[in-house]
Amino acid sequence: MTTKEKLVARLMRLPKDFTFDEAERLLTWFGYEKSNKGKTSGSRILFFFKKGRIPVFLHRPHPEKELKEYAIKQLLKELMINGDLNV
């Protein structure tokens, strides 16, 4: 099992300790690009795909590193809608 497959399997279990860095790595593997508007963009980060997929917005948690439960579920749902995950 590859590192990507392990991370996808981890996301599917909806862990309480899934970090923003893990989500960013996963989205990068699926071909999404991170877009923020400089230092003043706030904690809402956009990940976009050039064609045909809806963008994914994630809240960068602070001071902790773990995503909130709603953000993990939202990420999983949007990856399924975009066809990145086949369940």
Image (cartoon, rainbow, N blue to C red):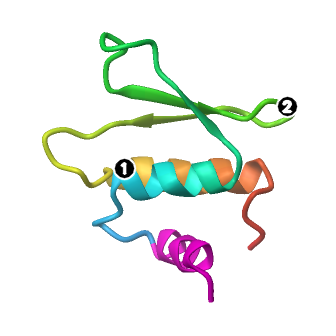
Q: Quadrant of residue 15?
A: bottom left
- Write the start and end of the magenta stretch as one range: 1-13
Label 2, residues with CA under 10 Å away: few <14, some 14-19, many ≥20:
few
Circle 1 Cα neighbour tier, 10 Å, few/some/many (<14 / 14–19 / ≥20) = many
Which quarter of the rendered picture does the C terminus lie within? bottom right
**Residue linked to disc 2:** 51
Q: Secondary structure at mark 2?
A: loop
User: What secondary structure is the stretch in magenta mostly built from?
Assistant: helix
Image coords of residue 45 (percent x, y): 45, 29
Pinpoint residue 5: horizontal percent, then vertical percent.
62, 77
Q: Amino acid at mark 2?
A: Lys
Label 1, label 2: how far apart the Cα atoms are: 24 Å
Q: Quadrant of the N terminus?
A: bottom right
47 in the magenta segment = no
Question: Which residue is the site of mark 1?
Answer: 20
Q: Residue furthest left?
A: 63
